[in-house]
Image (spheres, coloured by chain):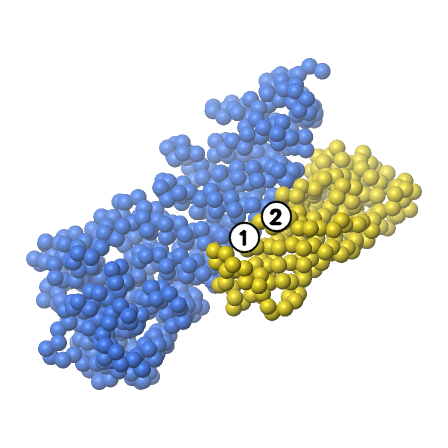
Amino acid sequence: MAGLEECEANLVVYLHPSKANCPSDAILSELSSLLFTYNETFGGVVLAYDPSIRSNLAKIVPGTFPCFGVQLKAKLLLFNPKPDMVLEGEVVKLTPNSIHAVVLGFSSAVIADDDIRDEFKHKVKGGEEVYVSRTHRKHKIKVGAILRFTVKSFDEEILHISGSLLAPHTGGARWLDKNTDEWSRVDSTATKRDTDKLLINVDTSMKNGEQIEKPKKRRREQS
Amino acid sequence: MGVPDMDELSFTDSQLHYYVKDALKSAIQGDCDFYNQLVAVMHRKERLSAADVALLVTCLKALTGAVSCIDISHHKSLLAAILRMSLWDYGTDVMDALTDALESLASSNGEHVNLCLEMLVSNFVPPSAYFEKHRGPSKKSEVLDRVHSTLIDIANVVPLSPMILEKLVRDKMPHVYVKEQPIVMYVESMLRLESGAMGELVGSMALIVLMDKLIELDVEIAWKDILEDDFQKDVFDFELEDLAGPADNFNQENKDYTREASMQRFCTGNHAEKLDSLMVLTFEHLQCCYETGRLVQVFEILLQSFRITVLTAYKSKFAQFVMFYACSLDPENCGKLFADALADIFVNGVHPEWRMSAVAYLASYLARAKFLPIPLIATMLERVVDWCSKYCKNRGSDINPKAHKVFYAGCQATMYVLCFRMKQMLALPRLKSQLKLMQIDDILGHPLKPLQVCLPSIVDEFLRQVKENRVCFLPERLADQDFLESEHSTVFGGIEKQGMFFPFDPILLANCDRYIRPNYVYWSMVRSSYDEEGTSDEDVADAYDREDGMSIPDEEESDADEFIPGFEKMSITPRDSSHRFGGRMPSKIRPSMSPESL
C-alpha cells in the first residue's frame, strides 16, 4: 500500500538519572511516546520502531540534573499519505452522503458524496446500507469490505484522511482485483502498489519531554 | 433562487437538504441569509411547540447530510449554536437528531472531533437549572444512554478519538467545590466509560482520576472535625457505637462522643457528603466489576493509584476504604495482593515516612479485615517481625525515637495486630508455634526499648492480653510498670504524629459504613471474646462473626448469663467507667492534650 515507508534513524535519547538501572525500558517507553503522532522530523506518523542500541556507554550531559544520552539506531515504519496516493481501508460506516473507512486500524478516512463518482448509488438492502455500481451490479461497497480510494488530503493533527472515489481504479478492492480489465482500460496511469523503501539518515536528538530539534536532513528521493 | 422562509415548511427533506448545502456554500461566499435563519433555528430552546421541534429535527437531519460542507472558520456561529445545545433541554426526537449530527460532524473532519467530544462530555452533567426542576430519572437515562452510545459510535469511525476523550474527561472533571449532584453524575459517567466498550482505553484514567478526586475531598475534611481534644489525660477514645445503656458521669459530660453524633457533626459538611456519595458509587462499581470477573485488573490499577496518592497523602481519612471494600469482595486475590504490597513497601521501600505509613496501613488492615484468613495474617505479621528482628540484631544502641522510627513503627504495628488477633492466633496450634518462633519478646526487650517509645495505650493493652492469655513467649509486664506517656512516645513519629495513624479505624461516613460493616472487626468483638468466661475456640470465632459488631450473644447461646450488668439485649457495648483506662483497646486514637496535637 502506498504511503508506508521504512526509514532508519540515528537517534540520541536523553534519560533521567533515575532510569539508570533500567535504561532499555526507559528507551522503549520514550520511543513509544512517538507512536501514532505525526512527526515532522521523520516526515510521517510513526507506526512501529525497532531499536538497536549501539553501545553500553552513554554521555552524561550536565544541566539542572545530569541526563545521560544513549545513542541508538532505530528502524521506523512511517505512514505519510500524500494526495493522489491510493490507499485501502475497511469500511466502517455508510450514509447516503458519505463513506467512512479505517486505514491500518487507526486512521479515519471519509469520502464525501461530492467525491463519490456518479457510478455509485446508495441503496438500503435488507436493512443494510450499501453502495452499488450502476454499471457493474456486482461491484458493491458494504460495511466490512475493503475500500480502495485516492487521498485528497491528510490532517496531521488527528490523522484524518479525506479521500475520493472519483477515479475509475477506486472502489471495492475485491471487485477491482478480480475485474482489472473492466476498469484499467479507462485508467491510463498505473497505480503504485509497492512499498517505497528509503533510507534516510536523520541526525536527531530527542530529549525527555523537550522539543525535538530540527535535524539536518538529506533530501529524500522518490523512487 | 429565492431564499425560502424557514417557517414555511413546505419543502421535502431532499429539497431542504439541497437548500442547507447551498446555504452553507453561500455563507462562505458572503451570502448569509439562509445561513442565519438556520443558526436562529438552532438557538430555539424554550417552550418548543410540536412544529418547532419538527423544524429543529429536520434542520439537524439536513445538516447531518451536509456536514462535508461545514467549514470550521466560515460557519463558526452555526457550529457554536449546535455545540451549545444541551441534550437535557430537549425531547428524545431532538436528542436523536442532535447525536446523529454530532457523530456525522466528528466523522467528517478531524478538526471537529475535539469539539464534538467536548460537547458530549459536557453533557455528562445537566445544566444547573435541571436540578431545580426535579425531573424524573427517565430523562437521565435517555440522555446518558445516547451520550455514551454516540461516544462509542464515534470511536468506531475515528479510532483515535478515545485518546482525545481520555484527556477531555480528565480535564473536565468538576472541582471539589462544585455541588454534590454534578460531581456524582460526572463520576457515574466516568465509571460507565470504564466498564463500557472503551474501558480498555480510557478505564485506567477514569479510576486514577477518581482516586485523585477522593483524596482531594478527603484532604479537605479537617482532622479536627473528627477528633476533639478537650479530653484530659485519657488519650483514648472509645469505639464509638450507638449506646443504649445507662449514661454514666463520663458519658454525660461527653454526650457528643457517640458515633452517630460524631457522624452527624461533620457529615453536614459538604465535602464529607460528597466523599460519602462518591465512595458509595465506587463501591457499587467495584461490586459490578467483581460480578463480571474484572475486579483483579481494576484492583491493580487502584493499587497503583493507592501507592502514588493515598499512601503518600498525609493521614488519609476514608479514601483508603475503597481498597478495603475491594479486598473484601475477593480476599484470595485482592486481599492478599494488598497485604503483600504494603509489606513490600515496608520491608523494601526507600522513603522512611512512606514505610511507616505502609506498616500503619498494614497493621490496621490486618487487624480490621474480617475476611482475611488468620494464617495469612500470621504470615504477614511474620514478614514485619522478621524485618524488625534483622534490624535490631546487630544494633546495640540505646533508645532514639527519631533515628529508628521505622523500627518502632514496625514494633507498634506488631503489637497492634496482636491486640486484635492474639486470641485467634493462639487458638490454632500451628499458628501458636509460628508466633513463638517469631521471637517477638527478643525484639520488644531489645535495648532500643520499643515498649517505651510506642504508644502507651497499645503497649498497655498488648501486655495485658499477653498476661490474660498466659502466653509465656511474649514479654511480661512487671508489676510496677505503668506505661504512661513518656517523652519518647510523644516524640515518636515526629511532629506529624506518624505514630498515631490507624487508617482503617471505623469509618464515619454513614452510607459507606453499611458496605464496610459486614466485613469489619470492631474492637467490641475482640473485647467480648475476653469478657465471656470460659470462651472456647468456637466462641472466639463467634465473637468475630457477629456481623453488626454487637457483643451480645444470641438467646440460644448457653453462656448468655455472663452479661455485664446494666446491659440490655440487642444494645451494644455498655459504657463501663471502671474499664476506662487500659480495659479497652482504643479503636480511634486521639491526640493527647499537648501543644503539638492536631
Q: Amino acid at mark 1?
A: Gly
> Which residue is at 84% across, 43% downward?
A169
Q: Is residue A5 left or right of residue B425?
A: right
> Which residue is at 22% across, 65% downward?
B491
Q: Is residue A218 left or right of residue B46?
A: right
> What color is chain B drawn in?
blue
Q: Is residue B575 above or below residue B113?
A: below
Q: Secondary structure at mark 1?
A: loop
> What color is chain A drawn in?
yellow
Q: Amino acid at mark 2?
A: Leu
Q: Is residue B70 visible?
A: yes
Q: Which mark is residue B160?
A: 2
Q: Residues within 10 Å of mark 1 (few under 14, many from 20)?
A: few
- Tag 2–tag 1 contact (CB < 8 Å): no
Name the residue beneath numbered marker 1: A209
Could you tell me residue A55's position as x and y percent?
A: 63, 68
Which of the pair B515/B79 is nearer the observer?
B79
| Quadrant of the rendering where the N terminus of chain B is positioned | top right
Q: Secondary structure at mark 2?
A: loop
Q: Is residue B528 visible?
A: no
